[in-house]
Image: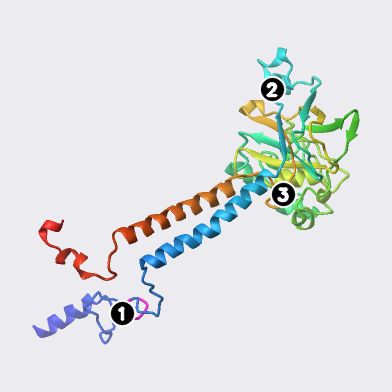
Amino acid sequence: MSSHTASSSNGGNGSGDSGAPRRNSKRPKYSKFTQQELPACKPILTPRWVVSAFLIIAIVFIPIGIACLLGSRDVVEVAKQYDTDCIPPANRSSKVQYIQSSANKTCTISMTIPKRMKKPIYVYYQLDNFYQNHRRYVKSRSDEQLKSSGKENDTSSCKPENTAVGGGPIVPCGLIAWSMFNDTYNFSRQNQELIVNKKGIAWKSDKEKRFGKDVFPKNFQGGGLQGGAILNDTVPLNEQEDLMVWMRTAALPTFRKLYGKIEVDLEANEVINVTLDNNYNTYSFNGKKKLVLSTTSWIGGRNDFLGIAYLTVGMICLALAMGFTAVYFIKPRRLGDPTFLSWNRGPGSQ
């Protein structure tokens, strides 16, 4: 009887090692880490500490918010939407057919400078409702092909723009390069041309590491359907900065990309005439196109969000500090008073 019991006990262990210790408790092994007994700072949040913390945050955040707003307001920006204005009135009911036709799409618009703009003046194009962050679109590229001429056949991730109609790989391949923006702008004031410098608009890391100096466009836009711009096949990719700017995909459906820089000052109330080629098809997906001229300040371009965010947090902390101070003086409470515990309070105090 006793041997049968012992045999059953050994079988229940699920192991042939009868000498292994058996734990009869689910309690974890004791350690200072599991029992939260490691040395730690455990501050007591007295009213003075809480009020002081909120005041310090308010004192720091409110001036930063004001400075950010003032820096943003120093930026002079002019934007002009032209996707509808550059369609002839007779073709505005069939915009897609017009933009895909071979008709002359040259258009002239004017922009009035509201305040003096100091050089350099950055020229951006802005697209709305263009989802560059779509998963299939973002993956449709070959970074290895962009870096090295020996990897020109590495196009497996570029479908459907991976192989030309006549055979051979497309360089650069993929939907991102295929859909490159191809509107062009020419600026003038008082019948004098304004030169747009298109050098130095791409990231230095892109020119030195991500795009090879021995990689040249090959069979580009040769997949049967032209998407956007046509690249110069005699210029290496590390010198084609428009391509580098476009290949840095945007996170949001409304984005701006740098087109170039105007390196002269523009005076207030000057009228800038822009002759543009309205080539890029945003009409198929109800997109919009804007031309933007902007200066910069120490905070960068115009963006009020950062200043408003700092001001909001600072004002909330200031209001909380004042509220807690008022409560502390109007209805003070002794720190650690046990009479406020529920089991020490009478039934009538609920």
The residue type indicated by label 3 comes to Ser
**Residue 126, relative to residue 146: is it above or below?**
above
Q: Picture coordinates of residue 216 (x, y %)?
A: 83, 47
Mark-to-mark CA distance, 3 and 1: 59 Å
Which corner quadrant of the image does residue 217 belong to?
top right
- Disc 1 secondary structure class: loop
Residue 79 can be seen, yes or no: yes
Q: Give whichever of discs 3 and 1 has the lower sequence position.
A: 1
Do the residues under discs 3 and 2 have CB atoms within 8 angstroms? Answer: no
- Which residue position is annotated with label 1? 29
Residue indicated by mark 2? 84
Q: Are marks 1 and 2 in contact (CB under 8 Å)?
A: no
Residue segment shown in magenta: 30-35
State the residue at coordinates (66%, 41%): 159
Location of residue 157 in the rendering, given as x and y in whole percent from the top left corner: 65, 47
Q: Which residue is mark 3?
A: 297
Name the amino acid type tagged 1. Lys
